[in-house]
Image (tube, rainbow, N blue to C red):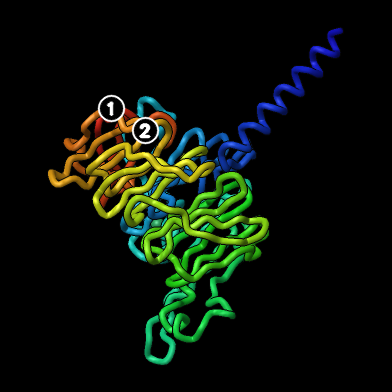
Amino acid sequence: MKKNKILIGVISIMFAGIITLGIIECNNSNTKDNDKLFIGNGKFCQAKRLNGLGAIYDDDYIFFDCENQIYESYNYSNKKNDKKLNVNCRNSACSHNNDKCEAYVELGEYFVFNSKIYKYYNKSKVVSGENRLYGSIVEEESGKTVFKNSIPTDMSSELAIDDSEAILYVRVLSDDIIKVDGDRHAYLLDKNFNIIYCHYNIGKFPWGAILNGNYYYINDINEIVKVNLTTFESKSIASNGKAFMADNDENFIYYSNEFSELYKLSPDDESSIKIADNALFFSVQNKYIYASGGDNGNKIIYDKNGKIIADYSACVNMGADSAFQINDKIYTIFNGGVAYMDLDGKNYGEMMQ
Ligand SMILES: [Zn+2]
């Protein structure tokens, strides 16, 4: 009897672990070596903002990709800690102002994928008198290069002229798939960084989503495109106006159009309903939508059906499309620091070095 109870307990714990891993991209190593660049305890997770990734974090620390290309950490587990950022560099003699500093990431970001920390970055090289960028992805712990961006081999020469080997953005779309955006092309890569899909009609923003085995993105003529990841058939979904920007949660896609109207799109029947006006720029984080872009420049928090929760215009350095959520706070990285507030816009503050 007792044995059975223990067995059920163990199975429940395993099950809970599987569920947790399925929902968030986390690193499951619980013991960390303090000699490592990223210290702290617990699982590593990934925060996402529309135009990039923003931060990785564990139970103790958030590591922000600050605007000076230097990673800075914030110890948020220590309640006594004042809101202060520290350069994430272990060398006390370092002045943290050049590419020798280990906190520096040249035109790139760290991300968590398939339980590991990776970094994408770009190196500039002068080739036939022209400054070109070459983008790579490396595994943080081993330093091993796992992917080098290249111009797709079957791309037409007219398109290839405007393309490059730079990596503009990496987005983690699921536990199995990341999206790498170049100048003209976007690749979907699997866990082993093999290319599983490529398209050349990338839009202005790197948003992409995987819902029910379909990949969605906005193309260069502002359509929302759906790609079946089994058959690789693609088609445009009808939208109200031109899709300017999009974000999603587990069930719906939200997009703004050229009239700054915000729509909620059901991937099942592909129908859209308008939920707000004055919301050109926005991001979906947890249970709310953080939006801006009206004539008056107001920043508004909506619920998922367009009900106004709060006006957060007074939170000067808090963004809309650049905002991201970690636990019970929303953050935005600005030039000089990191702004934060509660999910409902209360308790705004800023932290700096
Ligand atoms: Zn340094």
Please tell me whether residue 149 is drawn above or below residue 305 in the rendered image.
below
Q: Quadrant of residue 82?
A: top left
Image point (51%, 38%), residue name: 251
Q: Is residue 20 left or right of residue 248?
A: right
Please tell me whether residue 123 is drawn above or below residue 347 in the rendered image.
below
Q: Nearer the viewer, residue 50 or 101?
A: 50
Three-letter code, disc 2: Tyr
- Residue 110 is labelled as none
Q: Work out how far the residue at label 1 is from the one at label 2, CA to CA, in angstroms.
A: 8 Å
The total of numbered circles placed on residues is 2
Q: Badge 1 is on which residue?
A: 309
The reply to whether residue 336 is in sight is no
| Residue 186, image x, y percentages | 50, 66
Image point (32%, 37%), residue name: 275
Three-letter code, disc 1: Ile
**Circles 1 and 2: CB distance less than 8 Å?**
yes
Q: Is mark 1 within 8 Å of ligand 1?
A: no
| Residue 162, image x, y percentages | 41, 80
| Quarter of the figure that contains the N terminus | top right
Query: Dot 1 surroundings within 10 Å: few (below 14), some, or many (20 or more)?
Result: some
Q: Badge 2 is on which residue?
A: 288
- Among the two numbered marks 1 and 2 on one chain, the one whose residue lies closer to the N terminus: 2
Please tell me whether residue 180 is drawn above or below residue 133 in the rendered image.
above
Image point (56%, 45%), residue name: 211
Check disc 1 and report its element: helix, strand or loop: strand
Query: Dot 2 surroundings within 10 Å: few (below 14), some, or many (20 or more)?
Result: some
Q: Residue furthest left?
A: 296
